Image (spheres, rainbow, N blue to C red):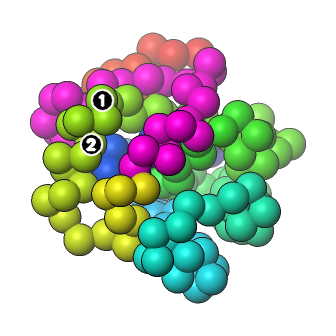
């Protein structure tokens, strides 16, 4: 049965890297949720302003539609999306049963260090607001990102095989 994996976590946690590695291992397409933000959202974040719930809703609804499109045609998919709040995860999942979340968990200091080493429209100073917004999921595969990306990916695949 087709399923969707939403790779979630704050900016800089490795969603794109892990999503791409999982895509290679599982043979499922990876869609980077950042690429589906409306231009207004990208401009707002680039200017150093955090998004609010109203900004995020159309983006989350678009990602839900992409998930549904894949599942409706029997295709599994991996999506990278911060999904910081439970309400956001509810929009992503909607009425679909076979959507699973993978939470990439890491400390503020580790993620800040990673963000400072890369070019991303999300500015490192906004990381604090993401941690303040984050509601860690109760129902997700949670993995620490303290290890190299390849080990994190192996751990996720192992948990996918054993998790209900």
Residue at 17 percent across and 46 percent down: it is 113
| Quadrant (top left, top right, bottom left, bottom right) of the N terminus | top right
Q: Out of 56 and 3, give the one closest to the viewer.
A: 56
Neighbor class of circle 2 (other Cα within 10 Å; few <14, some 14-19, many 20+) is: many
Circle 1: is it few (<14), some (14-19), or many (20+) Cα within 10 Å?
few
- Counting from the top left corner in percent of width and height, residue 96 is at 79, 42
Q: Is residue 19 left or right of residue 69?
A: left
Is 95 placed left or right of 128 in the picture?
right
Asked if one can make out residue 153 in the rendered structure from this viewpoint, the answer is: no
Label 1: state its secondary structure.
loop
Disc number placed over residue 43 in the picture, else none = none
Q: Is residue 134 magenta?
A: yes
Q: What kind of element bears circle 2?
A: helix
Q: Nearer the viewer, residue 99 or 37?
A: 37
Residue 74 image-quadrant placement: bottom right
Are the residues tagged 1 and 2 within 8 Å (C-beta)? yes
Q: Residue at x 62, y 18 (%)?
A: 138
Residue 29 percent across, percent down from the top left: 45, 61
Residue 98: x %, y % from top left:
69, 37
Q: Is residue 65 left or right of residue 136?
A: right
Q: Is residue 28 left or right of residue 156?
A: right
Q: What residue sits 74% from the left and 56% below the top?
A: 53
The residue at which mark 1 appears reads as 107
Task: Find the residue positioned furthest to the right.
Answer: 95
Quarter of the image with the C terminus is top right
Q: Which residues are magenta?
A: 127-154
Q: Is residue 113 above or below residue 57?
A: above
Residue picked out by circle 2: 111
């Amino acid at each position: 049965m087709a399923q969707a994996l939403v790779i979630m976590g704050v900016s800089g946690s490795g969603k794109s890297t892990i999503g791409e590695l999982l895509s290679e291992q599982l043979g499922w397409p990876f869609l980077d949720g950042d690429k589906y933000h409306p231009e207004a959202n990208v401009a707002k974040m680039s200017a150093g302003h955090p998004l609010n719930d109203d900004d995020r809703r159309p983006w989350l609804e678009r990602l839900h539609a992409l998930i549904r499109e894949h599942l409706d045609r029997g295709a599994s998919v991996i999506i990278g999306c911060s999904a910081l709040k439970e309400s956001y995860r509810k929009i992503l999942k909607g009425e679909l049963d076979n959507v699973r979340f993978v939470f990439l968990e890491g400390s503020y200091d580790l993620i800040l260090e990673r963000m400072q080493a890369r070019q991303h429209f999300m500015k490192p100073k906004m990381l604090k607001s993401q941690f303040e917004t984050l509601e860690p999921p109760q129902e997700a595969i949670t993995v620490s990102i303290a290890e190299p990306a390849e080990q994190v990916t192996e751990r996720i695949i192992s948990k996918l095989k054993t998790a209900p």
